[in-house]
Structures are given as C-alpha cells and as structure tokens.
Amino acid sequence: MRAQRWVRKWSRDVEADGFSPLPTQVVSNEEYLPLPQTPEQQRVAALLRETARRNARRLGVSRRDFLASSAGMASAFLALNTVFGRFFEVDPVEALESAAADERKPSDQFIFDIQTHHVAAPRQFPWLLGLRRIGRNWNRDLERDRGTMEDIYLENYIKEIFLDSDTTVAVISGIPSATDAGNILPPNKMAETRDIINRLATSQRLVAHGLVAPNKGPTDLDEMRRQAAELKISAWKGYTGLPFGDPPRPWRIDDEKVAYPMLEASRRLGIRNICLHKGLPLLNGVDEYWHPRDLERAAKDFPDLNFIVYHSAFRSLSPALDAARDEFRASARVDWVTDLCEIRRRNPNLTNIYAELGSTFGQMVITSPLLCGHVLGMLVQAFGADHVLWGTDSIWWGSPQWQIEALRRFAMPETLVKRFGYRPLTLDVKTQILGLNAARVYGIDPHLHRNPVPPDYVSKLKAAYLEEGPPPSLTQYGWVLGS
C-alpha cells in the first residue's frame, strides 16, 4: 500500500486531467486535515469522467469545455444521485443541454456569502496555520514547493467570487495573528479590498470584517476602536481557540474578564455582529475552546448583539460519516452541531445566535448528502430557517458556484423528514439561507443590488467575461490527500 501524501489539488487535476465542476474529494483550506477520497467519491469521479467523455464527443466539444458548462455541472449532480441516491434535483436532459440546466436557476436570486478569503499580495505563506508543516511528514516536496500564491491574491479572488459565481454581495474575512507580518489579510487590507471592489462596482458588493483577539489584552480594545473609526468595519471575526497574550492562552466568549470588555466595546462602537470560528478545530489551537458551549451565557448577557457561529460548530467529518453510514440508527448526534442546537432548544427566546455554513456544507454535500441533509435539517429545526446563514470559505475552495448550485438543487431526503420531522428545503427556505438572512443581519437591502440602474461595473464585466472570456477554471484551491 502506497503512503498517502499531500498534493496540491490544482496540480493533481492537471496531472490526471481530473477537472470537475465540483470537488470529488474533500479539499482542505489548510485549517483542518482533509479526508482521503472515499470509495463513494471515487465512483462519482469515475461516472463523471465517463459521462463527460461520452457527452463531449456527442456535442463536438472538448471534455474540459463540457465540464465547464452548465451541462457539466448537471452531470456532476447526476453522478452524485447515482452513487448516493436522489438528493439533487436534476434531469438527464440537463447533462446534454446547458440551456435546460440554466432554466432551473432562480432568476435574480440574492446571494450573500459571509465567509470569503484571500491573501494580501505580495505576502508569502507556504502554509496557513501550520498544516503544511504537518504535511511535510507525508510529502517532502513541501519543503521546497511553496505553491502558487497568485491563485489566492486579490485579482483571482475577484474573478472567482464575482465573475465565476452568482454571488451578489460577500464578506471579506480574516484570521487574527500574533503580529501584522504574520497575518494573511490584516484588517487594513480587508478594508482596502472592500473599497477596491465597491469602487469597481460603483455599488456595495463587499463588506469587511474587523479582527478581535481579546486574549491579547487591553491593547486589543484600542485596536478595535481604530478599526471601527478608520476602517468602518461591519462585524468582528474572532477565533476563541487561538492562544495569544503573555502567556499565550485561548479564550471563551463568556469570560467576564477577557471577552466581556470586548463585547461591551463592540456595543459602544455600534457593531452588533460577533462572528466566531467554532468547530473545525485549527491544528495550532486548543481543541476544547472551539466548542460552542460558551455562547449560551454570552448570548443571554448581550441580547442586543448577534453571535454568528462560523462552520455551525461542525467538529469533524470522519466520525460524522460513520453515523451517516449507519443512517443515524445508533445515534443522531453530530459533534458539535448537536450541542449548538441544544443551546437554542434550551433557550427558545435566545434568538441572537446564528449558524453559518462555510466549509461545513461544502465538505458534507460531496461526501455524504445524507449527513448534509441531517445537519441542515437539524439547524433549521432548532434555529429556524431565518437563522441559518450562507458562507462558502472561498476562495480556498475555488469559485463558490458549485456550492451555490448544490444548495439550490439539494432536496431534504424523505427518510429524514419522516424520522426527524425536518422541513423540506423549499425555494423560500433556500432563498433565505442563501442571502436574505444575512442581508437582514448586516442591514443590507437585497433589492438594491439587483437594480440594473445605475449599471454595475462588476456585472458588466461578468457579462463580458461570460461572453468573451475563458471558461471557469474548475479549480478547487487547497490540499488533498493522495497516494
């Protein structure tokens, strides 16, 4: 048996001609360890290759051009249905006629992606948050190969988010670090990205996060005031499991001495949205501090603030897959999503906690649609369809379009509806999740951005790009386990 090693996803695609409209194995954003390709995903990939070969020949186009089309995307969902069962709404004719696939798209749907990233050029990060250091144990090439940083700089960010996807508005987010030099995208650069894109668009297409790390001490309060005054940020992003300070320690959002001064400052500054990385424990953090248990008291004590739980506190894919393969007969629990939902069930009037789907939805929907339905159903049941927010963690995953299409087409399995009483994922529910909920939380008028007058330069550029430019790259950035 060959040892597994880290390989760059785009590099493997080029080598094996493995381009796909959506990933057929989990891609890491370098915050967590990805699973190797499952047997089911191998079958999906094989079916998609055969469909692409046959239909591309029939249509007289190259295989890659076919996969880059709407028909190619529909073929991917047909392959998923063949392997996993009918989870996605797709007709066979769509795999041959892109026009048929395009007709299924909702018209003028407002999509607000509240978790997107890029790296500030010309900063060089051979690894993000230390994962590639671990990867060197498997792939010695990482010692000399730092990857292609241009793939995750601003220019490609604009292309992937605003040209290659239906995203209407996005939030540019970041990760706190010990020093500015070690930050992939400091607050000033996030605000700069927002201003560049909004000037290009002559309308609001991007919103910027600020960063908080109250475990750094009182100086972080000064930094909060600076970001609010100078950068006009719209929300805070915090990572409770990252140790900072002297000595370095993680923190809890319900810590009266550490976190509450930050929350009180946020209230005074008029910034209501507190976004916290929960679940998907970072490898250089402290595991227990990624758990959402500390939200319950803080949300009660600060009812005028919104606590947005990034990744919906989803802990790890591997153990959840075991439960899904058993069809949740032994246990319906999903670490730590179930814990998050129980907070709301214990406190039905605690309406200021929201669940965000970045990376969680993306990795579940291509690995176990049944697990994906269970988690989505659980979140909607506990929090309400109006408290689940769309995020994709792009551009680490490439263009977010495949995730948008996956949620648009995803149908709640009847078995889960009958067993757990989950609501069907109607068009109204999906429209709320994909954008209207976040628009309400961020105070953005969703109708304004669909108004063609005045003309939106980004939309014009997108139209020209689709008409004259190259096809989407089909690239999912990040790292996978290969053999």
Image: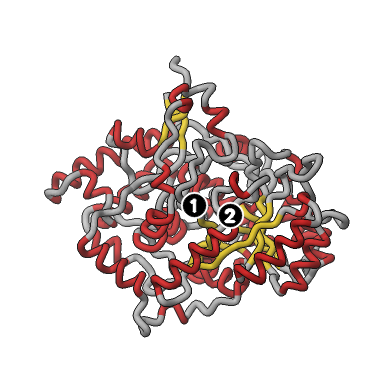
Circles 1 and 2: CB atoms closer than 8 Å: yes
Instruction: Assign the N terminus to one quadrant of the image.
Output: top left
Residue 37: x, y in percent? 45, 33
Residue sitting at 68 percent across and 54 percent down?
238
Q: Quadrant of residue 41?
A: top left
Question: Who's the residue at 76% across and 71% down the image?
Answer: 267
The spot of residue 215 in percent (x, y) is: 78, 50
Secondary structure at numbered mark 1: loop
Question: What amino acid is labelled 2 in the image?
Answer: Pro
Q: Secondary structure at mark 2?
A: loop
Q: Which amino acid does the dot numbered 1 rest on?
A: Ala
10 Å crowding of disc 1: few (<14), some (14-19), many (20+): some
Question: Which is nearer the eye, 197 or 59?
Answer: 197
Q: Is 354 on the left-hand or right-hand side of 98?
A: right
Tell which circle, 1 or 2, labels the residue nearer the N-terminal end: 1
Q: Is residue 337 above or below residue 203?
A: above
Q: Residue furthest left?
A: 60
Q: Residue shown at 39%/33% (left/top)? A: 42
Judging by the rendered image, the residue that carries numbered circle 1 is 120
* In-image side of 328 versus 190 (left or right): right
Spatial CA distance of label 1 from label 2 is 8 Å
